[in-house]
Image (spheres, rainbow, N blue to C red):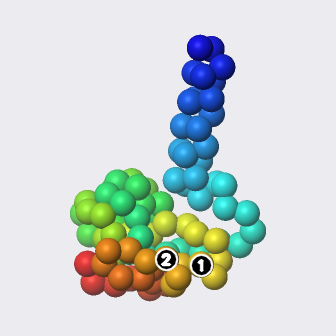
Amino acid sequence: MKSRNLAITAVTLAALAQDKGASIKGEKERCYGISMAGKNDCAAGPGTTCAGTSKMDYQGNAWKYVAKGTCTTMKTPKGMGSLKEVKS
């Protein structure tokens, strides 16, 4: 039971680190329109402060860090990721 709890804790911490782009190796780029509500790394438009403040899934003016060269290949229900802000 102890090792199961440790494994769950490790997975949770890894997921938290990934949310902040910490687990991305090499160069990173900002990718707009791919984050889930409250999971953006920064920039979420007027009335928000920064990280974790996006109001909706795939918000076009909220970005997450991704590995360089992968943003525009990421497909969401609202379209592909973008290197520039998009209308939500």
Left or right relative to 87: residue 82: right
Quadrant of the rendered structure where residue 35 is?
Answer: bottom left
Picture coordinates of residue 37, whole percent (x, y): 32, 58
Q: Residues within 10 Å of mark 2 (few under 14, many from 20)?
A: some
Question: Is residue 48 among what the camera can see?
Answer: no
As drawn, the residue found furthest toward the top would be: 1
Question: Along the line of sight, which residue is nearer the eye, 81 or 4?
Answer: 4
Relative vertical location of residue 10 with respect to residue 81 in this rendering, above or below: above
Q: Which residue is mark 1?
A: 70
Which mark is on residue 85?
A: none
Relative vertical location of residue 5 with respect to residue 30 in this rendering, above or below: above
Picture coordinates of residue 5, whole percent (x, y): 57, 21
Quadrant of the rendered structure where residue 86 is?
Answer: bottom left
Q: Label 2: state its secondary structure.
A: loop
Which amino acid does the dot numbered 1 rest on? Thr
Name the residue rendered at 33%, 69% in the picture.
Answer: 58
Q: Which residue is mark 2?
A: 74
Question: Is residue 80 among what the camera can see?
Answer: yes
